[in-house]
Amino acid sequence: MSRFPLNESEKLPKWQRPESLLMLMALAMPLAFSVWMAMLNNFSHDVAAFQGDDIGAIQAIREIPGFLAILVVYLLLLFTEQRLALISLLLLGLGTAMTGFLPSFWGIALTTMISSIGFHYYETVNQSLQLQWVPKERAPQVLGRLAGIGSSTAFIAFGLVWLLSQEGVVGSEPPYALIYVLGGVATMLLALIGWLAWPHFAEGTAQTKKLVFKKRYWLYYAIVGNAGARRQIFVVFAAFMVVDRFGFALHDMALLLIVNHAVSVFFLPMMGRMVGVHGERAVLTFEYIGLIAVFSAYGLILHPQAGAALGSWAYLLPMMAAALYVIDHIFFGLHFAQRTYFQKIADPEDFAPTAAVAFTINHIAAVALPYPLGLLYLYSPGAVFWIGVALAFLSLGLSRLIPRHPEKGHETTLSAPAGLAAAE
């Protein structure tokens, strides 16, 4: 099959260019993933009667495909990245659409595995496509815009969940199966449009079809690896905590996520511009200092004596938890600065294989931590978040090793020539 040369894409209508396909995929992914994420904690808690160890086990299962993202390198022998991204979106949509029909531990485990394969393999190849298809000088702004599109779509998905979960709109109970089907099928339809309506683009730079692990990328590996551990605190336990400890119903959780993404729609593109002006080190430093504060606050409000300490103000604890979750989400969204840092230091042919290696490194802790942290959560929910504080401190230290102007040969402040190191 002939493929359209990437360097001639300017001849195409704007809607058919590579950047527009990235926007379509950024639109498609959150429709399924956001619906799955918005309802998982309530669905598992209220319908499947999960406890903290159960949700930890499911989240560990969910991260296994991320740990195996390294296999993307071998799938690229069979599929181009563009095709693999769209196939992955189809799997994400399929797993999401099935979820509401299997309300048991093993049923949720099965649908979680299918959707997770789609999500993690999409994210791996999408990262590579972004770095190949978007010029370096525009990358921070474009990646921030793509993040904003994703947040806008998630906003719509969460709005759908909120509306349909209101008592009396469909019935007296939230129509979990219907909402899962709507989100999953929408993603599948957009993936099919992306397959049929866009040219099959040739690779900009031929990607290495083998594993790439280079010593000079060590700081990038360390940052994404520690981020995988820290991410679990937010993705798994911050969301489950507001349902389990503060009694948020599905419509409450959907409304909270709507607020999250309404803020992100405006905030993330602005942060993309800040990366372009101030650099990755400044933005990541801002993220990790913020996360230290947020995780510390989580630990404090979950202390057994928090309610007694607040006295007549104890009724504010659920609102405080909700506010922290929104702030947490904003900081979590700044991870795209890791990607632009790698784009600046990497060889172009390493984008796909290194994205796969980085995803695997990122998910080592993601697979290993949720279940033991779930057991810890049963006895001391606050302790989980104090571990998050320690991880955020480690991320902060690593981020300070990023040069103000990273490039090949100047990947860290430790690798800079003597004169430049002093300036850094």
Image: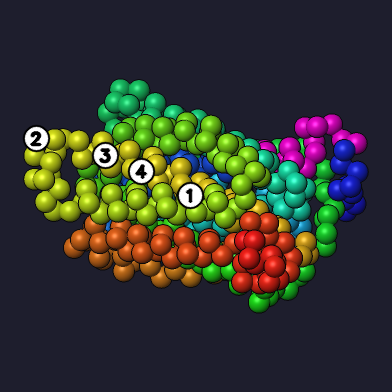
Residue extent of the magenta highlight:
11-25
For label 4, the residue is 325
CB under 8 Å between discs 3 and 4: no
- The quadrant the C terminus occupies is bottom right
Q: Residue at x 70, y 50 (%)?
A: 130
Image spot of residue 85 (x, y percent): 67, 52
Between the C-alphas of marks 1 and 3, the distance is 21 Å
The circle on residue 286 is 1
Q: Nearer the viewer, residue 196 or 59?
A: 59
Q: Position of residue 102 (x, y in %)?
A: 39, 50
Q: First in sequence: mark 1 or mark 3? A: 1
Q: Position of residue 57 (x, y in %)?
A: 35, 63
Q: Residues within 10 Å of mark 2 (few under 14, many from 20)?
A: few
Q: Which mark is residue 312?
A: 2
Mark 3 Cα-neighbour bin, 10 Å: few <14, some 14–19, many ≥20: few
Amino acid on which the number 4 mark rests in the picture: Tyr
Q: Residue 394 at what x, y percent from top left?
A: 43, 65
